[in-house]
Image: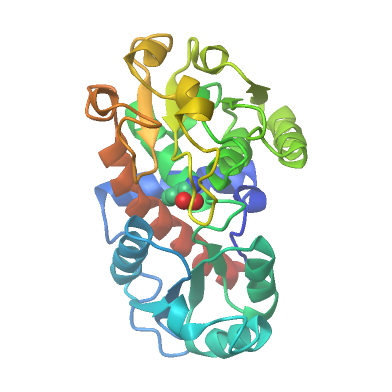
Amino acid sequence: MTIRHFLADDDLSPAEQREVLELAMTLRADRLARRPLEGRRDAPGAVAFITDKPTLRTQVSFAAAISDLGGYPLVVDGNLAQIGSRESIEDTARVLGRQVAAIAWRTYGQDHLETMAAHAGVPVVNALTDAFHPCQILADLTTIAQHRGGVAALPGTTFAFVGDAASNMGASYLLGGATAGLHVRVAAPEGFRPDPEILARAATIAEATGGSVTSVTEAADAVAGADVVATDTWVSMGDDAAGRDAATFGPYQVNAGLLGLAKPDAIVLHCLPAYRGKEITDDVLEGAQSVVWDEAENRLHAQKALLAWLLEEGTRG
Ligand code: NVA
């Protein structure tokens, strides 16, 4: 049996990502269309959501998704579990793998998640690490599909991200966007530009999907003519806030002036929590082009689709 994990955006091939997004769209309309965890007698029906960092949307959307899939959402406080200190990640993985159908983990190091996946024997999902936030990108792609002509229309969409492009969101937009065939443009100040290894990895994917990736320093160069404009906090969880202020990031604020450079019908995304007056202005976040509440809702549909896909894929192999 093949166990599939979702640790980074490009763990799904372009065709597989499309399947998950189509399923997310189906589940938007019919929330209970997939019930792989219901009434299981030969395998666990619970899914663990473990978090070592603050969480609201991710915890709630995973719990709601697992419940809709017919399973039991087991939310584990990482501060109590102390995975990797009180007990090794390897031992924890083997224990959890006997109790639950899948594990979603929000933690710091990507290497920790990889160790969990190597030993769990069940699908492991990245619920945010310092390196990637791939579930958010699935929700964002679902939101773009919802507002701009469906999953089939995603390739060729021009997507601009402005802000900390070296962050988990920056990296995931590059990899996940390239996988979807988007033209991904990121604009960031020096010191916050994307990791060259991630940029190269995304460029290789984009060559195959017909998309492209571009890294620039001027926000206007990324946003001009874009279909989608996205940003994120200047200070991610675990970051030192020093130097992550308006002096550095002010020119990357998504405000009416910057948004005015995008297509007139461009949509605005923000993974939340949003810091109004910092990376995005209140008028843009609350404005007609903002689809951030749909985006937050789509966490549920996209993660439900992903979990269903991973669980069903595991039984196909
Ligand atoms: N880049 C942000 C995303 C929050 C959902 C962080 O890691 O804090």
Left or right position of 76 against 98: left
How many numbered marks are there? 0
| Of the pair 58 and 149, the residue shown nearer to us | 58
Vertical position of residue 241 compared to residue 181: above or below: below
Residue at screen point 48% across, 84% down: 81
Left or right position of 163 against 211: left
Whole-percent x and y of residue 269? 38, 33
Give the colour scheme of this rendering: rainbow
Q: Is residue 230 visible?
A: yes
| Of the pair 164 and 121, the residue shown nearer to us | 164
Residue at screen point 55% across, 21% down: 156
Whole-percent x and y of residue 51? 45, 70
Left or right position of 47 against 146: right
Whole-percent x and y of residue 141? 45, 38
Residue at screen point 41% across, 79% down: 76
Whole-percent x and y of residue 27? 32, 52
Residue at screen point 51% across, 73% down: 103
| Of the pair 272 and 96, the residue shown nearer to us | 272
Q: Quadrant of the N terminus?
A: bottom right
- Residue 34 in which image quadrant: bottom left
Vertical position of residue 79 compared to residue 237: above or below: below
- Residue 79 in which image quadrant: bottom left
Q: Is residue 153 visible?
A: no
| Of the pair 294 and 163, the residue shown nearer to us | 163
Vertical position of residue 8 compared to residue 267: above or below: below
Left or right position of 242 against 210: left
Q: Quadrant of the C terminus?
A: bottom right
